[in-house]
Amino acid sequence: MKRDYRLDVIRAVAILMIFTFHFCSAIGNKGVFYGYANGGWGSVGTTMFFILSGFLLGTKYHANISIKNFYWKRWLSIFPLFYLTFAVAFIVNGLTTGNWKYGGEWWRMVFTLFGCDNFLGFYGISSYALVGEWFTAVIVIIYLAYPLLNIFYQRYKSLGSVLIYGLYFINLGVEWFQIVDDANPITGIAMFWTGMLAAGYTDKIKNRLFLIPEAGLAVLVIFVKLPGNPLLWKNMLACMIFGMLFIGGEYVEKVPFAAKAFLFISKYSYGIYLCHHFIIIRGLALAPDYMGRFGTAAEYAVLLIVTAAVSVALYQLLERIKALARRAGESVLLCGK
C-alpha cells in the first residue's frame, strides 16, 4: 500500500502540539502556543491521534479480522518501545535522584507494565510513572474494544454511531469518571469512531470546498469563547484541523525540506510522545529560571532536538535488541536440532 503523506503531516502536527503544550505548561507560559479561547492545544493533539488511529484501522481491517493477530500487532506497536523508554528513564531517574522506590511498593510497577500508571494518577494512585501519558491507557482500552467496534462498523454502523455519540454527549454533562474529560475513555472511543467513519469518506474529505467551512469554524473556536463544555469545542477543532491537514497535506509534500521534516517527526512521533515530558522537565531544571523571549525559543528548540535525538536512539536500540533476540532464537533452534 502506498504511503499516504497527508497522514504523516497530521501525525507530525499532532505531536508538535502536544510537545509545545507541555513545554509551555512547564515554563508557566499560557500564551497562544499553550492554548486558544476554548482550551489547550495538547488536548487537540491527542484528539487528532485518536481520530488518526481510527482512520488507519478503518482503512486496514475489515470483516475478516483475526483478533489474535490484531492484539499481537497492537502490543508490538505500543509496549516494546514503551518498556525500553521507561527502563532508560527509570535508570536515569534513579541515578540522578538516588530514589529507586519513588513509586512506593515494588508491586506498583505492574501499573507501568500495563501502561496505565499515568491514567491511574488521576485517582491519586501512586506508581512508577515516568514516560508516556494518560493517552497510553486510553488507546489500549480502545484497542481492546476494537473488535466490537469493528463489528458495529461493518454491520450496524448507524446503531454504533447512535450509541457512541449518545454516550459522548451524555458524558459532556455527566461526571462519569474521576478524571479530566480529555482522558475519558468515552471521549477517546468517540473520536476513534469518528476516524473510522472518516475512513469511508476519503473522497469527500479530499474535496477542497470543505476547507472554507472547516477553516471558518476553526477560527471561531480558536478566537471566540463558546458556551457549554469546552471538550466539545476541543474535539470539534481537532476534527477541523484533521480535515484541513488531510486536504492540504499533499501541498506540503511538494516542499522538499518541509516534506523531510514532517516525515522524520511522523516516523519518530511515538518515541517523542513517550519521552518528551521526561526530557522537558529535566531539561528545564538545568536552565535559568528566566531566559527572555529569544532564550525561551532557543530552549524550546534545543529540547525538541534532544527529544527527537533520544527518540531515534531508542528506536535504534530497540531494533538491536530485536536483532539479538532473533539471533538467540535461531541459536536455540539450531541447538535443538
Image (cartoon, rainbow, N blue to C red):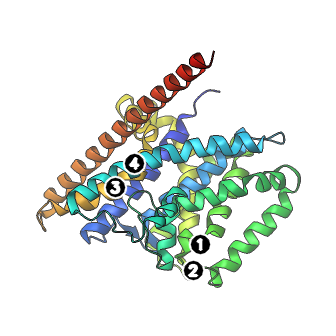
Q: Amino acid at mark 3?
A: Phe
Q: Earlier in the sequence, mark 3 or mark 4?
A: 4
**Callout 2: SS:** loop
Please tell me which residue lies in front, 11 or 87: 87
Please tell me which residue lies in front, 109 or 304: 109
Local crowd at mark 1 within 10 Å, few (<14), some, or many (≥20)?
some
Q: Amino acid at mark 2?
A: Asn
Q: Residue at x 56, y 23 (%)?
A: 332
User: What residue is pinned by disc 2?
Assistant: 229
Q: From the viewer's perspective, is the residue at label 2 or at label 4 nearer?
A: 4
User: What residue is pinned by disc 1?
Assistant: 232
User: What residue is pinned by disc 3?
Assistant: 90
Looking at the picture, does residue 70 appear above or below residue 152?
above
Please tell me which residue lies in front, 333 or 312: 333
Q: Earlier in the sequence, mark 2 or mark 4?
A: 4
Q: Which mark is residue 85?
A: 4
Is 43 positioned to the left or the right of 191 in the image?
Answer: left
> Quarter-wise, where is residue 63 in the image?
top right
Q: Earlier in the sequence, mark 3 or mark 1?
A: 3
Question: Do callouts 4 and 1 mark residues in contact (Cβ within 8 Å)?
Answer: no
Mark-to-mark CA distance, 3 and 4: 8 Å
Mark-to-mark CA distance, 4 and 1: 33 Å
Question: Do callouts 2 and 1 mark residues in contact (Cβ within 8 Å)?
Answer: yes
The image shows residue 276 at horizontal and vertical percentages of 35, 54
The image shows residue 68 at horizontal and vertical percentages of 74, 43
Q: Amino acid at mark 1?
A: Leu
